[in-house]
Image (cartoon, rainbow, N blue to C red):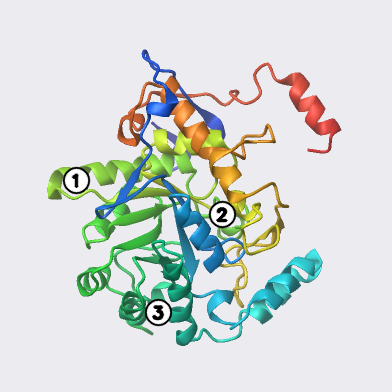
Amino acid sequence: MEFELGRGKRARRAYGFDEVALVPGTVTINPAEIDVSFQLDGSTFDIPFLAAAMDGVVDPRFAVAMGRLGGLAVLNLDGLQTRYEDPSEALQEIADTPPEKINLLLQRLYTAPVQDGLIGQRIEQIKHGGVRCAVSSIPNHAERRGPLVQEAGADVLVVQGTVLTARHVSRSYRQLSFRELTKALDIPVVVGNCVDYATALELMDTGIKGLLVGVGPGAACTTRAVLGVGVPQVTATSDCAAARDDHLRRSGERVAIITDGGMRIGGDVTKAFASGADAVMIGSIFAATEDAAGHGNHWGMATPDPNLPRGTRIRTGIKGRLEEVLFGPAHVDDGSMNLVGALKSAMGVCGARTIREFQDTEMVIAPSIKTEGKTEQRAQRVGMGA
């Protein structure tokens, strides 16, 4: 349904996680008997969780920990890990700097050039831990880096920008061809970010194996405020999932839909899957783990941009170990721990044995779902300063 914004301008309603709810199924299933595995180009992961390519989250140590727990962490090839032989001093400086000086500091730290030798070294460190390795590059360098990271042993290449399309117009530089890139590499290529059906379908036709969904929903991202661009994640995921299904019917190949950002608690995660996601990519929740690189701090990939920063450092604090955040036991009641347990429990009450079955779960528009009957909880959280 479309609404009139003014003469000659109409818009359709879009929905975010806080505006919808899942309807329980007619059959319930024991969560212990539910399969939440995720496939990417024939490779199976025990859990459908990816750690975002954020410098406050993923370093080689975190990537190994994530891989051993059954998920996949993405290392940022344009970040501190590939600019500094030992990035620990820079990470500590980011943690210690006051808010009013943080963006200038980030811009300064990210002026150091990326070193190709460190790219191979970081991939080798992750592979030495016995896990699969995913790395992320901005589009400008993806064509050159693709063969390099494949030779170094990376298992997945993610090409990531604020917004990516299959067609890009520029007179000053050569456009990256995703079709040529996917043909040139033997490892799967995942691209993002995207929020609409037509663009998603066109990107899938280039041979990519996964699509990141989301523009500006991340906790540390200010793209939506700075540029005014973005689509709420439930609608964006649903639209891109529709493109996946149509592409599957047309080509016989299934491209993984990965909802990227905007999830703060387990309920957001479950709604992403019910909206059509095959996996989710998370940043801020993982930044709040003991295993993360940022000492309880989180900042976006566009935060250090020298011309138009779109993000800031946020202090997440440290809630517990990565294993606790994924599998529990949870020692907080806000839904930010035991994400896998929350997913399995939600699938159980909705009668879904697999992620694909869960994607068919009935959803309702429910803007009061988090506040209905919760007056005392809200008053108590305000009193505690939450």
Using the numbered discs, state the Cα–Cα distance from disc 1 to disc 3 in whole angstroms.
Answer: 30 Å
Viewer-proximal residue among 205 and 327: 327
Q: Return the disc, 1 or 3, that comes first in the chain's sequence.
A: 3
* Mark sitting on residue 248: 1
Viewer-proximal residue among 347 and 11: 347
Q: Return the disc, 3 or 2, that comes first in the chain's sequence.
A: 3
Please tell me in which quadrant of the rendered image residue 194 appears.
bottom left
Instruction: Report which residue position mark 2 lands on.
Output: 283
Three-letter amino acid code of the residue under disc 3 = His
Using the numbered discs, state the Cα–Cα distance from disc 3 to disc 2 in whole angstroms.
Answer: 23 Å
268 displayed left or right of 12:
right
Residue 304 image point, x, y percent: 62, 72
Secondary-structure class at tag 2? loop
Counting other residues with Cα less than 10 Å from the Cα at mark 1, is it few (<14), some (14-19), or many (20 or more)? some
Q: What residue occupies the far right of the structure in this picture?
A: 383
Secondary-structure class at tag 1? helix
Instruction: Report which residue position mark 3 lands on.
Output: 141
Please tell me in which quadrant of the rendered image residue 370 appears.
top right
Using the numbered discs, state the Cα–Cα distance from disc 1 to disc 2 in whole angstroms.
Answer: 29 Å
